[in-house]
Amino acid sequence: MRKNLPFLVAAVIAAGLAVPAAYAVQRAVDVVFRGAEPNPATIVWSAHIAMFWRLAIGAYVGGLVAPLAYVAARKDLARTMRVLGACVLPVAILIGVQGLLMP
């Protein structure tokens, strides 16, 4: 198990980065192309709230990205971690812009 731990960590990091990125992109598409939608923070919980669907799709995308990152890490761990490290700031900016401009 300890041999695979760095590769699993890389996969978890990649999945963790994919979820907010997918959410932000989906929200931006909804705002730009589909028009107004109520702010999810101001309405009562329902299974039909788009925020929960975006989160579920983001989790699905994260699940798709994780095995790819695992395989990439098995091939070259250092390069994979450099790429993931470089992705942290763009994902943070993406989710920050989405949160500020498209709540």
Image (cartoon, rainbow, N blue to C red):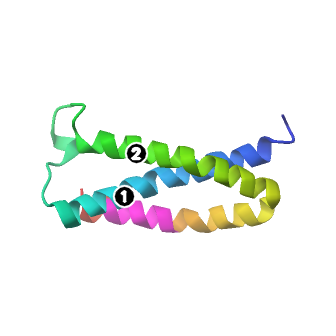
Residue closest to the eye, 86 or 60: 60
Asked whether disc 1 touches disc 2, contact meaning CB atoms under 8 Å apart, the reply is no
In this view, 34 is above or below 4 = below
The segment highlighted magenta reads 90-98
Q: Nearer the viewer, mark 1 or mark 2?
A: 2
Q: Is residue 75 left or right of residue 90?
A: right
Looking at the rendered structure, the kind of residue marked 2 is: Ile
Q: Which residue is mark 2?
A: 57
**Residue farthest along the right direction in this orientation:** 3
Mark toward the start of the polypeptide (1 vs 2): 1
Q: Residue at x 36, y 61 (%)?
A: 25
The residue depicted at 43 percent of the width and 67 percent of the height is: 93
Count residues near mark 2 (Cα–Cα under 10 Å), then give few for <14, some for 14-19, many for 20+: some
Q: Residues within 10 Å of mark 1 (few under 14, many from 20)?
A: many
Q: Residue at x 25, y 31 (%)?
A: 47
Query: To which quarter of the image does residue 98 belong?
Result: bottom left
Q: Position of residue 41 (x, y in %)?
A: 22, 43
Location of mark 1 (residue): 24
At 21% across and 67% down in the image, what residue appears?
Answer: 32
Q: In which image quadrant can residue 100 be found?
A: bottom left
Chief SS of the magenta region? helix
Which type of secondary structure does the marked residue at label 2 adopt? helix
Say whether residue 95 is magenta: yes
x, y percentage for residue 76?
A: 81, 61
Q: Quadrant of the C terminus?
A: bottom left
Q: Locate the N terminus and report the quarter of the image it occupies.
A: top right
In x, y percent, where is residue 89? 53, 67
State how far apart marks 1 and 2 are (Cα): 11 Å
Q: Amino acid at mark 1?
A: Ala
Eyeballing the image, is 73 above or below 89? above
Taking the image as shown, residue 39 lies to the left or right of residue 95, namely left
In front here: 83 or 42?
A: 83
